[in-house]
Amino acid sequence: MSSIQVQLINSIQSGLSSLFQIDETELSLQETKKEFEGTYTFVVFPYTQRAAKAPGQIAQMLGEFLLADIPSLVKAYQVVQGFLNISLHDSVWYSLIQDIAQDKSAFQLAPKNEKILIEYSSPNTNKPLHLGHLRNNFLGYSVAEILKAGGYEVVKTNLVNDRGIHICKSMLAYRLFGHRETPESSGIKGDHLVGKYYVAFDKAYKAEIEKLVAGGMEAEQAKNQAPIMQQAQAMLLAWEQGDAEVMELWEKMNSWVFAGFETSYQQMGVNFDKIYRESNTYLLGKKLVEEGLQQGIFYQKPDNSVWINLEAEGLDEKLVLRKDGTSVYITQDMGTAQLKYEDFGANQSIYVVGNEQDYHFEVLFHILKKLNKPFSTGNYHLSYGMVDLPSGKMKSREGTVVDADDLMEEMVNTAKERTLELGKIEGFTEEESNALFHQLGMGALKYFLLKVDPKKRMLFNPEESIDFQGNTGPFIQYTHARICSIRRKALEKGFSLEGNINQTSALAESEKELIYLLGTYKSRLAEACDNFSPSVIAQYSFDLAKQFNKFYNELSILNEENEQVRQLRLILADVTGKTIQHAISLLGIVSPERM
RNA sequence: GGUUCCGUAGCUCAGUUGGAUAGAGCAACUGCCUUCUAAGCAGUAGGUCUUUGGUUCGAAUCCAAACGGAAUCACCA
């Protein structure tokens, strides 16, 4: 809350107390709606009974009280129905923009002295990344940036799922149909090449099932009996036993995938402080299971499988180790939790994982609690909604996925087309042009995916291209470029962006609103932090850019003849530019200086 | 079937702890480039906030039920 709001609330508080003997500790102000005059609105309905007066009368009396109590702040008030609308003196806005312009930590909240670990991306090494991963990666990266700006120490990790039956499927298919092709020989990016064999496995598997069913076998049995599936299971066993040939193939194909992912991550502009692999953490998970077994937290069934009973927590019995002693998904997560704690000892640990795994994380956190380790607390599942297509959920095996690399390339190409159409790259070198196309394409894509509340599922229609106009990344980037242009021209003309602001004339409405918005940045940032929600920042960036464009359109900056007014507007533009740049950098979006 | 989540303009989404006549963008239509970048600005049109009942000064928001949709309930991850 800004100091302006604090002063207003304190004054209203004492007004309520002295006028009506009402002592209220939790008062809230709201923004005045556009169609009424004023900046802040106080709603008096809740006090009519206790004050034994009509709403209008209470508002009237409070308004007079404010005028007398804080005359330097409050210029006027209007009573509309039961709403007390408060207008502030221009001097308040002048001093606010002055403060913001000089605030060295305008973009940084106070240190929290807390370390937060955030795990995101978490791909499987059997197929390339798709649109869902893009939402995950942009979200994880952005939340990390937001938390940093919010005063937390942040560690970014990525847990790669590089082992298991699904990995063996692509390995087996490669062995059967691959003819030793490599990313180099085929010209196919490593992760896509491996993904090709994952699909090939599924195709062969389905054909075998069909054949068995045609021969009179039940579908369920056919799924288990299909030779290629049995081969895959045998391969998994061989892997767990460290079979040299299988390990060699596994390492070779994984290295292709990792190289491919690295390229994709670079395009996305995301990075990690530490990459974990499940092949390195699942054994630690097994140890934790043994430990818990001895402590009686887990129990063993006659077939040797190990379980935990969470019925008291309203859940079910859950398996933590298979009867053959191999680990399952949750075993690995237990091990990873411990490893992360040993490596970083964070106060909080966030898992950026889709909401289809809500139940899994509920179980995991209960298990960790029961283990009663230092990492049993502070765990949070940042559960985001799926990206659906008009046809429904994306399914990799059925080929109904939007590939991440393809989509990014398409976005950059679209950015190129738009930019060339508009003839916006005069004087750019080829390198600068390409950088701009990338910044704009990715800006559009990131904004598109981040502007929506993370918790909600969202729709992507591949038939409709992502916009570059309106509520979009490029719109905000464009506003920044405009401001940069003003800066350049101001400096050419010898105008300073640093000077003091002197109050002379009355502020225009669009100036006041811009200052007001700039003044709310920190509280929006805090809100984004508390909710792990980049969409708060996205929404703010758009509002700010929109307001700036209105201001820009209505008023002259460089052509303003009154030097004091010009100075104010220049600083207003400059601060807006810096704020936009900072805000969208939290979304992983670059602010071009020209476009 | 159990559990959880969702339902706001033709489409994609905002909508703070309940507050005024429910907001943006896209798409449609009308204006504005000889002046700081028109990827912009201003305007018109578009709504039974799925439905019904309840709580109260006041409900898109809280409660209940119905209808519609999604996720999950694996010795998959």
Image (tube, helix red, strand yellow):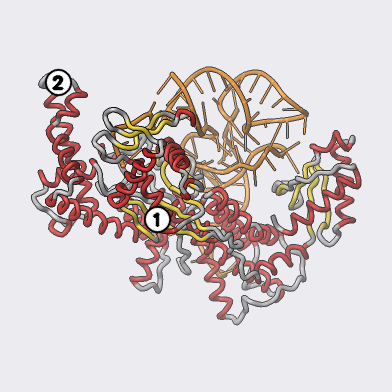
According to the picture, the residue beneath numbered tag 2 turns out to be A217
Place of residue A539 in the rendered image (x, y in percent of width and height, measured from the top left): 55, 51
> Could you tell me the amino acid type at mark 1?
Thr
According to the picture, the residue beneath numbered tag 1 turns out to be A157
* Residue located 35% across and 43% down the image: A462
Callout 2: residue from which chain?
A: A
Q: Nearer the viewer, residue A527 or A593?
A: A527
Callout 1: residue from which chain?
A: A
**Which part of the image, by quadrant, shows the C terminus of chain A?**
bottom left
Q: Which of A335 and A222 is in front in this view?
A: A335
Q: In this view, does A2 lie to the left or right of A19?
A: left
Decide: is A420 above or below A366: below
Q: Which residue lies furthest to the front in this view?
A: A294
Decide: is A431 above or below A417: below
**Residue at disc 2, secondary structure:** loop
Q: Nearer the viewer, residue B76 or A97?
A: B76
Location of residue A310 by image quarter: top left
**Which part of the image, by quadrant, shows the N terminus of chain A?**
bottom right
Q: Is residue A581 visible?
A: yes
Place of residue A113 in the rendered image (x, y in percent of width and height, measured from the top left): 57, 61
Place of residue A64 in the rendered image (x, y in percent of width and height, measured from the top left): 89, 50
In this view, the mark in front (1 or 2): 1
